[in-house]
Image: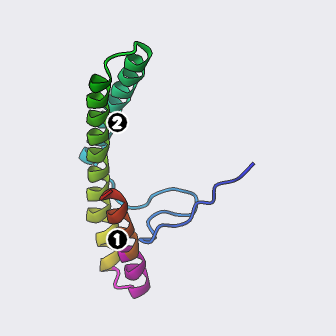
């Protein structure tokens, strides 16, 4: 059995226990929760379409909708991270933390741009 090691994020806002001390915009949190519940329903619909052997093109269109919805969730989370975590870290004027944050943001941008 492996144990997941939680490390602090570059901004220092997340402690090693996985908690987060920085701000999460309540509107973004609510919006993302709503989107994820909708996506969950879409995925269940995809499963049903496969079980019912629905026309492939219809399944692919639904799959495309789910992927775009997930990208929207990612954009919301990235917005929150930039607005709060990144901004807070840069304002601390700690060059090491700022460098780590820049690296983290660049990695997130590359991964989300795929």
Classify mark 1: helix, strand or loop.
helix
> Is 8 part of what is drawn in magenta?
no
Residue drawn at point x = 30 percent, y = 59 percent? 113
Q: Position of residue 15 (x, y in %)?
A: 52, 63
Give the image's coloring scheme: rainbow
Q: Position of residue 64 (x, y in %)?
A: 28, 36
Residue 103 figure quarter:
bottom left
Residue drawn at point x = 44 percent, y = 71 percent? 10
- CA distance for labels 2 and 1: 25 Å
Category of crowding for the residue at label 2, using alpha-carbon neighbours closer than 10 angstroms: few (below 14), some (14–19), many (at least 20): some
Category of crowding for the residue at label 1, using alpha-carbon neighbours closer than 10 angstroms: few (below 14), some (14–19), many (at least 20): few
Q: What is the quadrant of the C terminus in the image?
A: bottom left
Asked if disc 2 and disc 1 are in contact, CB closer than 8 Å, the reply is: no
Q: Dot 1 corresponds to which residue? A: 106
Q: Dot 2 corresponds to which residue? A: 36
Q: Nearer the viewer, residue 18 or 3?
A: 3
Classify mark 2: helix, strand or loop.
helix
Q: Position of residue 108 (x, y in %)?
A: 36, 63
Residue 22 figure quarter:
bottom left
Q: Is residue 75 above or below residue 15?
A: above
Residue drawn at point x = 44 percent, y = 15 percent? 51
Query: Which residues, given as a range, are shown in magenta?
Result: 92-102
């Amino acid at each position: 059995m492996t144990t997941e090691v939680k490390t602090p994020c570059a901004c220092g806002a997340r402690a090693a226990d996985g908690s987060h001390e920085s701000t999460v915009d309540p509107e973004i949190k609510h919006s993302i929760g709503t989107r994820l519940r909708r996506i969950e329903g879409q995925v269940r619909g995809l499963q049903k379409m496969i079980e019912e052997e629905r026309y492939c093109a219809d399944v692919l269109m639904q799959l495309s909708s789910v992927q775009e919805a997930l990208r929207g969730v990612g954009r919301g989370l990235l917005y929150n991270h930039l607005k709060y975590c990144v901004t807070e870290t840069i304002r601390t004027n700690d060059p090491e933390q700022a460098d780590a944050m820049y690296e983290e943001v660049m990695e997130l941008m590359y991964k989300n741009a795929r």
